[in-house]
Image: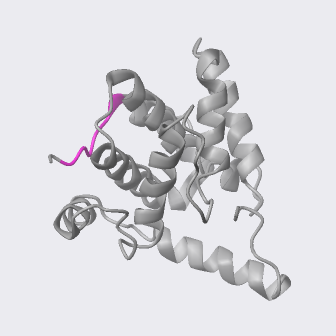
Amino acid sequence: MPVETHNPLIESILSDWRERIGDDYAGYRGHVYRMFNYCLALHPASDEEKTKLAIAACFHDIGLWSDHTVDYLAPSVAQAENYLAETGREAWSEEISLMIEWHHKVRPYRDQQFPLVEVFRRGDLVDFSLGFFKCGLPKGLVNQVKAAIPNAGFHRFLLKGAKDWFVKHPFSPPPFMKW
């Protein structure tokens, strides 16, 4: 599978956020592309599905920067819904909102009305776990994506946020975790 390292839609969406994301931009951009590639490897996507995956990938963690909070799922959904309304894609709001809302669900998402929600959850898990969880993807493919798209400090950024959360809330899971 050829690794997609440049997608015009992803570039367009993320460029609007570059200044706000700041020093974390390269890391987040890499995360978006890695998980996007994992999603495409997990599910042979139509052009419409690929567009939905690209939009959800761009916005799924954006609340970390838009609202400066670890409780970032609702702000991320709101930013995606704003984008969908601005671009005339309101019909996709429910599906993309679910993709973002449930991307850290520990157990599989089972509602078959929107199969991309589970694809997206699994694609994010592969990257979040640094490939420890492959979700059925071949190890070689995961390594190929990781080699083509640098981490650029993204997981270091996540560890810092996790440390800050657990210092303040040692007995509580982060608010973005869903069972």
Q: Could you tell me residue 37's position as x and y percent?
A: 31, 48
Judging depth in this view, the residue of 111 and 58 nearest the camera is 111
Quadrant housing the C terminus: bottom right
Question: What residue do we see at 62% from left, 45% from top?
Answer: 100
Colouring chosen for the image of the structure = one colour
**The magenta stretch spans residue 167:** no
Between residues 25 and 1, which one lies in front from this camera angle? 1
From the top left corner, tell me how far across and down residue 54 is, in percent. Answer: 44, 36
| Residue 80 image offset from top left, x and y in percent | 64, 33
Task: Characterize the magenta stretch by its predominant secondary structure.
Answer: loop
> What is the quadrant of residue 113 in the picture?
top right
Residue depicted at 42% across the width and 36% down the height:
10
Q: Residue at horizontal 77%, vertical 50%?
A: 67
Q: Is residue 167 left or right of residue 15?
A: right
Nearer to us in this view, 40 or 58? 40
Q: Taking 138 as reference, is 62 left or right?
A: right
Query: Which contiguous range is marked in magenta?
Result: 3-8
